[in-house]
Amino acid sequence: MVKDITIGQYFPGRSVIHKLDPRMKLVLTLFFIVFIFVCHNFWSLGLMVVTLGLVVALSRISIKTILRGIKPVVIIILFTAVLNLLYIRTGDLIWEWKFLHLYTGGIYTASFMVVRILALIVASSMLTYTTSPTLITDAIERLLSPLKFMRGGVHTIAMMMTIALRFIPTLIEEFDKITSAQKARGADLETGNILERTRALIPVFIPLFITSFRRAYELAYAMECRCYHGYEGRTRMRQMKLEARDYVALLLIVVVMAAIILLNHFFGKLV
């Protein structure tokens, strides 16, 4: 399941979503995430899901890749759904067994929360799927550029975030290699209860931490050897410039946001 984690990976392409300005994609992603929480009923949330589906279609990212990104958090989603099913006691009672009760309100809330979490995961993943780490760094640095007058260390913050995203696939690959090596030595990582499996992973996590620190040291040493000084005197090969497609995307998101506010006003809270 660890190999299925696709967060932080970049899939090159020439779609409309790939060609959008990274600053605009970052801002639109933040707006999209905020308005997912603004949705109060299935009508407004459905509009967000349709919009997200359109983005996925335009990005030409395969559905298989999207599902791989969702697979590692299925347990969390199911746990959230079960909690809402059992603890929300509004609406009509449709099933009862001892201390367990199932109400229509619990079903509505559980369904609503599952769709919301899935939309959050897919929307966040689409940013890294269609934008390279370098462009994400430049976008964050440009958006936070006003802070450089307050000695905010904008470039350092942006570089730290990008390196963290970049090393997620690397650490996942390293985890898989160490796990395979331990299994080849006879380690049993798949049987027993939760505590036994957790204890069996200690021989995996220790070399993983050591390898992570070694990689961090090597990266810092390589940057120092190349006289890297961050923002000072830095030039960029690609200059960011907003184009017509960026303004069209912004206009569409504004229209969707306005529609969500209207749907919330007319239909109210369904969950």
Image (cartoon, rainbow, N blue to C red):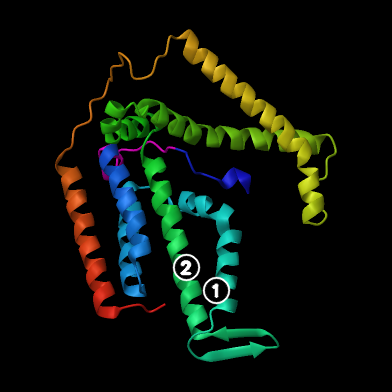
101 inside magenta stretch: no
Q: Nearer the viewer, residue 87 or 108?
A: 87
Residue that appears at 80% across and 44% down: 200
Which image quadrant for residue 238?
top left
Please, which residue is most extreme toward the left here? 244
x, y (%) of residue 229?
40, 14
Can residue 189 be seen in this snapshot?
A: no
CB atoms of marks 1 and 2 within 8 Å: yes
Snapshot quadrant of residue 17: top left
Q: Which residue is mark 2?
A: 113
What's under tag 2, amino acid-wise?
Answer: Met
Q: Is residue 203 above or below residue 119?
A: above
Residue at 44% over, 71% down = 112
Q: Which residue is mark 1?
A: 84
* Three-letter residue code for mark 1: Asn
Q: Residues within 10 Å of mark 1 (few under 14, many from 20)?
A: many
